[in-house]
Image (cartoon, helix red, strand yellow):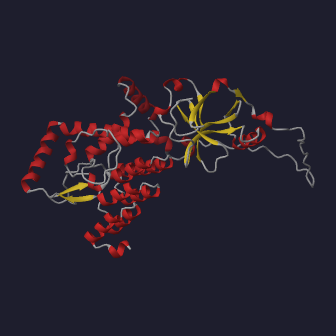
Amino acid sequence: MTGQPPAHVVHRGMVDAAGLAFSLVRQSEAEAARRIVAEWRPGSAIYRFPDWLVLRWPSARSQSSEAALGLLLTSSGGCLLSAPLQPSELEEDWAREPALLLVEGGSIRRLLLRESETVDPGAWIDLADWRTLIMRPLGANLPPGERFIPRRFVAETDMKGLATVLAGRDELLASLDARAVTASHPKPLDGLARALTARLQGWSPGRRGPESPSGELLSPTGPVRDTSPPWMFALKNWAHGAALRAGLLDRVVQSQASFVAHSIHLFESGELLEALRFAIPVRPEAVEARAHLFRALKPRHVLQVTAGGARSVGIGVPTDIRTHLEFLYREAADRLEQQGRIEEAAFALTELLGLHATAVSLLEKHGRRREAALLAEGQDLAPCMQVRQWLIAGEPARAVLIARRTGAFADAV
């Protein structure tokens, strides 16, 4: 056990559970066995400790803590955790050997899996009174018919014209394999980075066309009027052309594409906190029309919701990449809320997606009332919402001050 009391004692909300634990002190072994059999899946394993029975599934399953038949367990580094424990709450050598980490009495108890007894669930099922039933038809027996053997579908022969299309396929594949052998082995993210590079290079936010007249720039949300003075606009065009001719723009775009590819990989791998450090915002006000061309993207040091003032900026990306990033950010916000990481979920909503009102509602829902009020005022949301949030936060003087300044008495009431 550790001397430091953990911040959480159990998992809450929806959890990607790796198994269940059943206390033999709070229930009988027969009841625990009945629940384990009900939750059994092929490939599962059962471990017996003196006062616990543990069911481990072959793969993680999304479970609700309120509806679970036992204590939810998650997997981390080969260990089974009964609560969302932080690395600072664990001993350094605990990850070296698979174990069950339980929060009991305000401390963490460690039970090694190698010291447990493996249980066969078949021993719990009593087949003594089981009898097979002999089925007899009510009428005469039907004569045996011929066995039906399904015919396998072969595309090359069953689809007309496909054989001609596939002619020379083997030679083409062999040629591609030969090129792959001679080329250096790419890194895992190189494929995605190259695809993003091609998309960013083919989508120039400073390119003019019939749908973007002079003085307008294409952005993820449509044409944006460049309000710079004429001399500044001409200087931007000259700098863009010079960088393009020198090959500098291609290098910057490749660096940005690798950064975005790494961010997408982290989100899709479930490393949400690390992914948020690398995430680029897609809210409209975060993308400057052409200033992003020479911006070196860097990960954040802290994940903090800024009520107003300087905020992180992003880069312009094509609509399909932007849509995929929005999906990843929304999904991350939902999962972080389920895990109890409310500040990080609010960060994804307001800093990355620009959903400021949604972030305010999330903070208020989970008791962060002052933070919700600061965010509503800092983002200059509707005056009635600002007044309401400060009243809920217990600061009526500030609410009255905003109501006087904006004349939002009627809406606030």
| Residue drawn where x is 35% and y is 76% of the image | 410
In the picture provided, is 77 more to the left or to the right than 283?
right
| Residue 186 shown left or right of residue 20 in the figure | left
In front: 281, or 347? Answer: 347
Residue 404 percent coordinates (x, y)? 27, 71
Please tell me which residue lies in front, 159 or 94: 94
In percent of the image, x 50 and y 44: which residue is there?
162
Give the total of numbered labels. 0
Residue positioned 43% across, 58% down in the render: 364
Seen in the picture, residue 3 relative to 337 is either above or below; the reply is: above
Identity of the residue furthest to the left in this view: 231
Q: Quadrant of residue 298?
A: top left
Image quadrant of residue 265?
top left
Determine whether 246 is above or below 381 in the image: above
Where residue 100 sits: x, y (%)? 60, 31
User: Front-most of 278 and 233?
Assistant: 278
Instruction: Identify the residue shown where x is 20% and y is 42%.
Output: 294
Percent x, y of residue 146? 80, 44
Q: Is residue 117 left or right of residue 203?
A: right
